[in-house]
Image (cartoon, grey):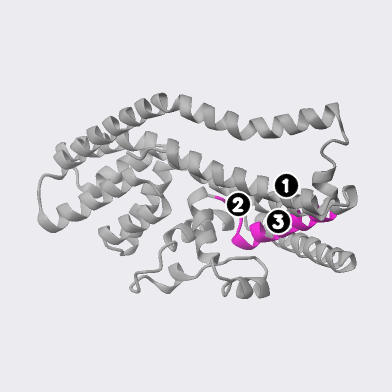
Amino acid sequence: MTITLTALWIFLISLFFIEFGFYTYRSVRYPNRSRIRKRLKGLSSDNTFIEQPEILRQKVFSEIGFLNKLLAHVPGIESLDRLIVQANSSYSAGFYIQISLFLMITAFVGGSIVSSNSLVALMAGSILGTAPFWVLRIKKKRRIATFQKQLPEALELIARALKAGHAFTSGIKLAAEEFKDPLGSEFQATLDEINFGSSVADAFKNMSNRIDCPELRFFVVSVILQRETGGNLAEIIESLSHLIRDRFKFEGKIRVLSAEGRLSAAILVVLPLVIALVINMISPNYLEPLFTDPSGKMAAVAALAGMAVGIVFIKQMIKIRV
């Protein structure tokens, strides 16, 4: 078993360095390639429209040819690729999968060397193996939060531009020029799609898929409905901007009111771990049966499973959607 894990670990390290070497070489030789590919990747994040040009529907999951073909048939790779687009990461899905496998096997082998308990090694491997994907989720969450803060001002700018007599695409262009990433770059990508020949509805649907933001969906639905049914678009966008601002104020009040519950949940989650650590420092042999005795292992697993279920329940109780 150890020989197999070591061989797999060496293989993943070699594969990782090959991928990293390809990426470094192409980044140095073609400095604009990464920027162009990221732009095309954002434009091709939604494949539901057959009329899109073929070049926009091709995706690259890895810099290595055979690995790219292999990953194209892996279940869930599309969701990971979409998460990478939403997090605005410059690395491919294959890179994150290799990093995850490398960290998981490294942690498992290291945990097996440090501790004879396979449960500890498995937990370490699971935690480190999922770390890259949690990093992507955190980056996505921060990017969406920044986008949400920029959106009301951008909508007001577009509404003022429409009242001044500018076309809708001109208002989008003004917002793209005035605001930084992520709103500026996403609006510019949407404007590029329109200039490439996509319809306004399709371009805004693609932007809604790239940015998982409910406030943006309100804007997209409003624009599509207005183009189909008519109406004063400037007043619609201005009203939507005020509605989004009021929604943010209401969410702030909810966060203040639920702060006590969130703090209590954090204490209840951390307290057992702190107590176990203190007991282990005072009496190192007291908790040893949890890791050596079969019944103790089952009790430890049951306790961790109970904590996980409790965390899920507490999170759902204190989570209030507006």
**In the visual, does 118 lie left or right of 71?**
right
Q: Marks 2/1: CA distance?
A: 26 Å
Q: Residues within 10 Å of mark 3 (few under 14, many from 20)?
A: many
Contact, CB < 8 Å: mark 3 with mark 1? no
**Which residue lies at the image location 82% right of the left edge and 38% below the top edge?**
287
Closer to the N terminus: mark 2 or mark 1?
Answer: 2
Query: Is residue 37 on the magenta stretch?
Result: no
Q: Marks 3/2: CA distance?
A: 10 Å
- Label 1 sits on a secondary structure element that is helix
Q: Residues within 10 Å of mark 1 (few under 14, many from 20)?
A: some
Q: Which residues are magenta?
A: 89-109
Q: Quadrant of the C terminus?
A: top left
Q: Which mark is residue 300?
A: 1
Q: Which mark is residue 99?
A: 3
**Which residue lies at the image location 40% right of the left edge and 42% below the top edge?**
184
Foreground: disc 3 or disc 1: 1
- The image quadrant of residue 55 is bottom left
